[in-house]
Image: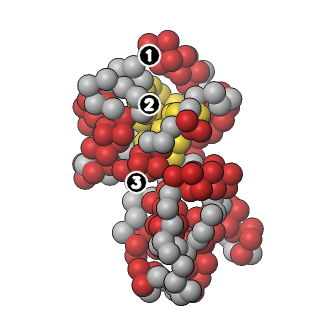
Amino acid sequence: MTGTIRVLLADDQPLIRLGFRGLIATHSDFEVVGEAEDGRQAVELARSARADVVLMDIRMPVLDGLAATRQICEDENLDGVKVLILTTFEHDEYVLEALRAGASGFLGKATEPSDLLNAIRVVAGGESLLSPRATSSLITRFLRPADETGSTPEVFSALTERELEILMLVAQGLSNTDIAEKLFISPLTAKTHVNRTMMKLHARDRAQLVILAYQSGLIRP
């Protein structure tokens, strides 16, 4: 993504929002366009402030981050808005539901500042923030895969052999660059394959591709 990334902060703790705002303000490629102290405000501001990325806490009053994420991601007028969940991860069993609702990724609140900024850039650029380690942990703990069938699920019948291969790599948490290196293709070609796969499977983003791959039994923990 080129240009300034517009960020909306959604957290019920003022000090956390202040810290995020201070960090983001030190980088010229970001702009904080609003702050929400509950999920309802987050949805309203997402509509009015036209943010590119919403940093969303899960546990908030009035409307929690999970419900707010679903409302944002189901709103056709907010199609370009990405949601990045901020959580304690290993203790937060709502993460999977947030991804199902359309969130583009998740990040622990204890992460390094540079990692947070990079995460915003990754999500704003259209990729989901799902590292191989985080993906494996998430799937193993929270997702019940389909029963063993011994064949490729029917839902993937529209995919070409290369797109199916791409899907499996995405489900393992690989980025476009990682996929390009592994398959000896350009990152742009990898991105094109990923986009076509999402379109054929009616997936909002890569995070939903991961969920679909595991729930169908294509990939197993």
Label 3 packing within 10 angstroms: few (<14), some (14-19), many (20+): many
Residue 36 visible from this viewpoint: no
Q: Residue furthest top?
A: 15
Quarter of the image where one finds residue 56: top left
Three-letter residue code for mark 2 = Asp
State the image coordinates of residue 178 (x, y, percent, origin top left): 70, 62
* Foreground pick, 156 / 193: 156
> Residue at left 47%, top 82%?
153
State the image coordinates of residue 137 (x, y, percent, origin top left): 63, 51
| Residue under pointer 3 | 100
Three-letter residue code for mark 1 = Gln
Pick whichever of labels 3 and 2 is earlier in the sequence: 2
Q: CB under 8 Å between callouts 3 and 2?
A: no
Label 2 packing within 10 angstroms: few (<14), some (14-19), many (20+): many
Alpha-carbon span between mark 2 and mark 1 = 10 Å
Q: CB under 8 Å between callouts 1 and 3?
A: no
Disc sitting over residue 57 in the figure: 2
Report the side of 205 relative to 67 (left or right).
right
Element class at badge 1: loop
Element class at badge 2: strand
Give above or below for 98 relative to 161: above
Label 1 packing within 10 angstroms: few (<14), some (14-19), many (20+): few
Disc sitting over residue 130 in the figure: none
| Residue under pointer 1 | 13
Pick whichever of labels 1 and 3 is earlier in the sequence: 1
> Residue at left 28%, top 30%?
63
Alpha-carbon span between mark 1 and mark 3 = 25 Å
Three-letter residue code for mark 3 = Arg
Give above or below for 137 relative to 157: above
Alpha-carbon span between mark 3 and mark 2 = 16 Å
